[in-house]
Amino acid sequence: MTALDLSRLITAVADTIAAHAEELTALDQAIGDGDHGLNMKRGFEAVRAEAEAFSAKPLPDALKAIGTKLVMTVGGASGPLFGTLFLALGKEISADPDRANLTSAFGKAIEAVAARGKSHVGQKTMLDVLQPVHDALAKGSSLAEMADIADAAAEATAPMKALRGRASFLGDRSIGHMDAGARSTALLVRTLAQTIGDKA
């Protein structure tokens, strides 16, 4: 991944999160603190501001730097979780990853997020999107297919009862609302897939 590619990816992700900030906030207002959209927008704008510096680093170091920035700037529960995803990915990925390395690194990153959030698949969190995407990556799915899987997985959190986070306090009232973290994760997956193009 060249420096230009990473900078372009950062810009695309920041644009997408900014464009969907109100939607994410509305989702979070239904069953959470109502700050997810603004928090995510702030975090990725902070990453965008340093895109040039990040893209000059080797990929593992760039991902770790992005993760650190997200932890420091996103706030709420999402900062540590999304930050952990990038930090753990940076620790496991090679400077020029192939699909096998990316699959392994992504799997380890998901485990780190699960440990940080003390949660697992089926509890109405971002893990409900991350795990199906990882499974698709492992099976050799295309980037476009993974983006569709991520969108469907986010939608599938709506009928779930929340068992982690602020939404879990609502019990059955959390049913019927898509999880904001799952939605923002799906947005990231689709943006990365569309920006990279189907070359993986």
Image (cartoon, helix red, strand yellow):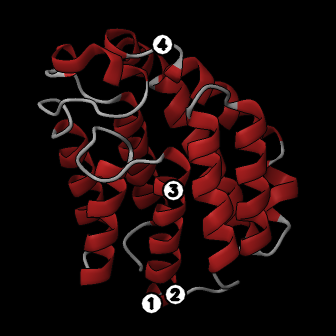
Q: Which residue is mark 1?
A: 100
Cα distance, mark 4 to mark 3? 22 Å
Cα distance, mark 2 to mark 4? 36 Å
Q: Is residue 92 left or right of residue 32?
A: right
Q: Where on the picture, by quarter, is residue 130?
A: bottom left
- Could you tell me the amino acid type at mark 4? Asp
Q: Residues within 10 Å of mark 2 (few under 14, many from 20)?
A: some
Task: Name which residue lies at 51% across and 56% down.
Answer: 115
Cα distance, mark 2 to mark 3? 21 Å
Q: Looking at the rendering, in which quadrant would you find the N terminus?
A: bottom right
Label 2: element kind: helix
Q: Which residue is mark 2?
A: 101
- Could you tell me the amino acid type at mark 1? Ala
Residue 185 vertical placement versus 25 (above, below): below
Q: Earlier in the sequence, mark 2 or mark 4?
A: 4
Q: Looking at the rendering, in which quadrant would you find the C terminus?
A: bottom left
Q: Residues within 10 Å of mark 3 (few under 14, many from 20)?
A: few
Residue 52 x/y as whole percent: 84, 53
Counting every numbered tag in the picture gives 4
Task: Name which residue lies at 81% across and 38% down.
Answer: 49
Q: Earlier in the sequence, mark 3 or mark 1?
A: 1
Residue 9 vertical placement versus 24 (above, below): below
Between label 3 and label 1, give the one nearer the viewer: 3
- Could you tell me the amino acid type at mark 2? Asn
Q: Residues within 10 Å of mark 4 (few under 14, many from 20)?
A: some
Instruction: State yes or no: discs 2 and 1 in contact (Cβ < 8 Å).
Output: yes
Q: Which residue is mark 3?
A: 115
Label 4: element kind: loop
Residue 155 x/y as whole percent: 19, 37
Between label 2 and label 4, give the one nearer the viewer: 4
- Could you tell me the amino acid type at mark 3? Ala
Q: Residues within 10 Å of mark 1 (few under 14, many from 20)?
A: few
